[in-house]
Image: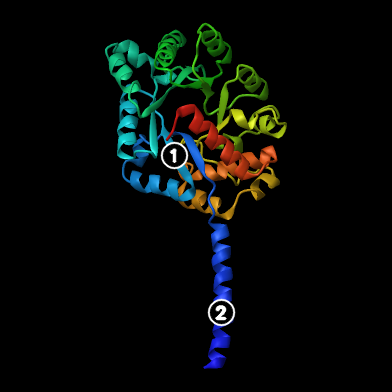
Amino acid sequence: MERQQQQVAPVAEEQLDIEDSMKHCFENLIVIDVGANLTNKKYSRDLDSVVQRARDAGVQKLMVHGTSVKSSKEALRLSRIYPDIIYSTAGIHPHDSKSIVEEPSTWFDFEHIAQAQECVAIGPCGLDYQRDFSEPDVQKQIFAKQLHLAIHLKKPLLIHERSAQHDVLEILDKFENLPPVIIRGFMGTAEEALKYLDRRFYISLTGYLCKDKSDTGVRRLLDNGTLPLDRLLVETDAPFMYPNTRASKLPQHVKSGITERSLLYLHRYCTFQRNEPCSLPAIVEMIAAFMKKTPDEVALATAFNALKLFGLS
């Protein structure tokens, strides 16, 4: 009997060691995704699972973007189904600007959606000159309407800008008493980022940093310390912007900075065709590696910025 007890003790100690090891492995970063397109039809069959996976991965809160009147209404509905987890935004994306011109009465529906308590920001709105789904003059008109609305409601602005920085800044500079401005899904150059940062705007980054191969883009912004933590937010832009951690141009020290747990969620549940919010910890870890900071520092700073900006409870 005594011999059996002596054998049990080492086994018990070994079990505790394994549990401690597993606990360390499964410690989560606490992060907030300020941009997920969960109204996309790609999530229509398993949204509950997508939200639960995000939570399990450490994504405590999600902001679901509205990019049209219809999707803004749907984003608001989701925020009521998942209270204190999902928050909505109301925006007319530049691509969808012409829909308001073609059906002016829908603007009143949009205003009503934007006033809801669960709607924490106006946007994405702005200008996109890379594609011509809506004419530039129409984009400018609807962008300005959303700026007026954001000022009236005192809600932060999510700006979408592609190859249109000059015009975006020209329009923004015409307005006084702007609420906090976030340049979401930033894909520009370090020089362009500085123009936003000089105005005390915030910049939100996605998995695009895996694709950026330029010497003047997002990676440089992080490498040289141009982007301070108190101006940084993170988002997945799911189901888009899959963070390809296997990209050949991604530096080895960045790949090495991604934990097994984050890679597990990324490779098991996310694809190029359908990214998910559970990929956010991997994005945060890559940003941290580029910035030469710890993932905890980046996670804490970006979560604090989101809570403060959007009044998330």
Q: Mark 2 belongs to which amino acid?
A: Val
Q: Position of residue 103 (x, y in %)?
A: 28, 13
Identify whether 45 is placed above or below 124.
below
- Residue at the disc numbered 2: 11
User: Tag 1, which secondary structure?
Assistant: strand
Nearer-the-camera pick, 167 or 108:
108
Q: Position of residue 307 (x, y in %)?
A: 49, 33
Nearer-the-camera pick, 267 or 236:
236
Nearer-the-camera pick, 110 or 98:
110
User: Which numbered disc covers residue 61?
Assistant: 1
Farthest residue to the right: give it: 224
Using the rendered view, name the quadrant where residue 212 is placed.
top right
Residue 275 can be seen, yes or no: no
State the CA–CA distance, disc 2 to disc 1: 40 Å
Q: Is residue 127 left or right of residue 114?
A: right
Residue 254 can be seen, yes or no: yes
Using the rendered view, name the quadrant where residue 72 is placed.
top left
Q: Is residue 281 left or right of residue 41?
A: right
Q: Mark 1 belongs to which amino acid?
A: Lys
